[in-house]
């Protein structure tokens, strides 16, 4: 239980600090009580007594957790806070806001992809499940048929998402999926020629083969070649666009 007592009016910044502490305590209790996705939290009057705060502070804490995707606040009688599963969009939004204020550009995101993708492919070769391998094979088969289609870019992103999550490391999956959401609009402007798409499909075929054979070294090497070549291609095709800054609104537009 938090050791706080609120009497009368308090400055908003003080209430904000208390609300953050209450939010942390709520997350602790969700875990300690083994609550699952879809479970309701206790009624408001019980939470007020448990955390010893004013209604405004409790509601601010719940709103903060809702913005992070941890809770869903159901309106109306019988509603209230319900445990939710944070989505990729929640993570992307928080990341985009920070990137916006540190002046990150598209080139920096592509450099991060160059660092992440080969390592994710290497881990996927070691850890991918049978279900992961089936999903990758199915997505790659679609990609092969879409070299001349407007669907290529989206399917290509989906393949790389699947590969990152197949690594068994959720950070690879989260960061890769977030990068794709942040760069979706920019990649539409950049785009790949049909020749470059064919090059990527050939490289990805080697990655898929290596992952299937559990050959981590080859999977990493082929993915390195793919992302390095892609970065060079995009930089030469549209150098001005590479300097475009990340904006927080991109997380919502995606």
Image (tube, rainbow, N blue to C red):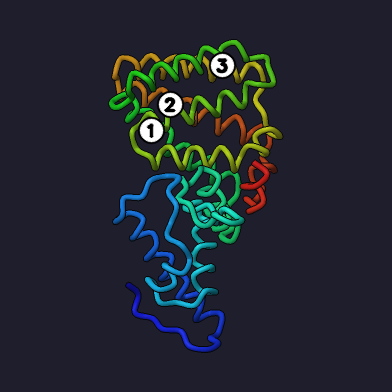
Per the image, the residue denoted by label 3 is 143
Residue 49, how many percent across, how many down? 40, 73
Q: Element type at marker 2?
A: helix
Q: Element type at marker 1?
A: helix
Left or right placement of residue 75 versus residue 171 in this view: right
What's the residue at 66%, 17% (across, down)?
194
Q: Element type at marker 3?
A: helix
Q: Earlier in the sequence, mark 3 or mark 2?
A: 3
Per the image, the residue denoted by label 2 is 223
**Is 226 or 137 nearer to us in this picture?**
137
Label 1 to label 3, Cα distance in Å? 20 Å
Query: Could you classify mark 1 by the number of other residues whose Cα lies within 10 Å: few (under 14), some (14-19), or many (20 or more)?
Result: many
Residue 247, compared with residue 240, is above or below; it is below
Residue 222, how many percent across, how many down? 41, 22
Query: Could you classify mark 2 by the number of other residues whose Cα lies within 10 Å: few (under 14), some (14-19), or many (20 or more)?
Result: many
Q: Earlier in the sequence, mark 1 or mark 3?
A: 1
Residue 85, compared with residue 133, is above or below; it is below
Location of residue 136 (image quadrant): top left
Quarter of the image with the C terminus is top right
Q: CB under 8 Å between callouts 1 and 2?
A: yes
Location of residue 79 (image quadrant): bottom right
Q: Earlier in the sequence, mark 1 or mark 2?
A: 1
Left or right placement of residue 235 versus residue 33 in this view: right
Q: CB under 8 Å between callouts 3 and 2?
A: no
């Amino acid at each position: 239980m938090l050791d706080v007592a609120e009497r009368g009016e308090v400055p908003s910044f003080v209430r904000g600090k208390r609300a953050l502490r209450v939010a942390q305590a709520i997350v602790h209790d969700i875990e300690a009580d083994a609550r699952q996705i879809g479970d309701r939290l206790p009624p408001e009057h019980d939470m007020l007594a448990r955390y010893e705060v004013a209604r405004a502070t409790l509601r601010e804490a719940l709103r903060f957790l809702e913005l992070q995707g941890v809770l869903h606040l159901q309106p109306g009688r019988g509603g209230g806070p319900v445990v939710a599963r944070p989505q990729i969009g929640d993570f992307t939004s928080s990341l985009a806001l920070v990137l916006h204020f540190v002046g990150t550009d598209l080139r920096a995101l592509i450099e991060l992809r160059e660092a992440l993708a080969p390592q994710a492919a290497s881990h996927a070769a070691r850890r991918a499940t049978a279900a992961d391998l089936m999903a990758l094979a199915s997505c790659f088969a679609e990609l092969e048929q879409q070299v001349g289609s407007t669907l290529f870019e989206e399917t290509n992103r989906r393949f790389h998402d699947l590969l990152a999550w197949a690594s068994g490391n959720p950070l690879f999956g989260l960061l890769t999926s977030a990068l794709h959401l942040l760069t979706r609009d920019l990649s539409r402007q950049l785009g790949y020629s049909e020749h470059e798409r064919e090059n990527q499909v050939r490289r990805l075929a080697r990655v898929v083969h290596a992952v299937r054979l559990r050959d981590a070294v080859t999977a990493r090497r082929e993915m390195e070649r793919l992302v390095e070549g892609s970065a060079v291609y995009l930089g030469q095709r549209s150098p001005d666009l590479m300097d475009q800054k990340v904006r927080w609104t991109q997380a919502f537009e995606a």
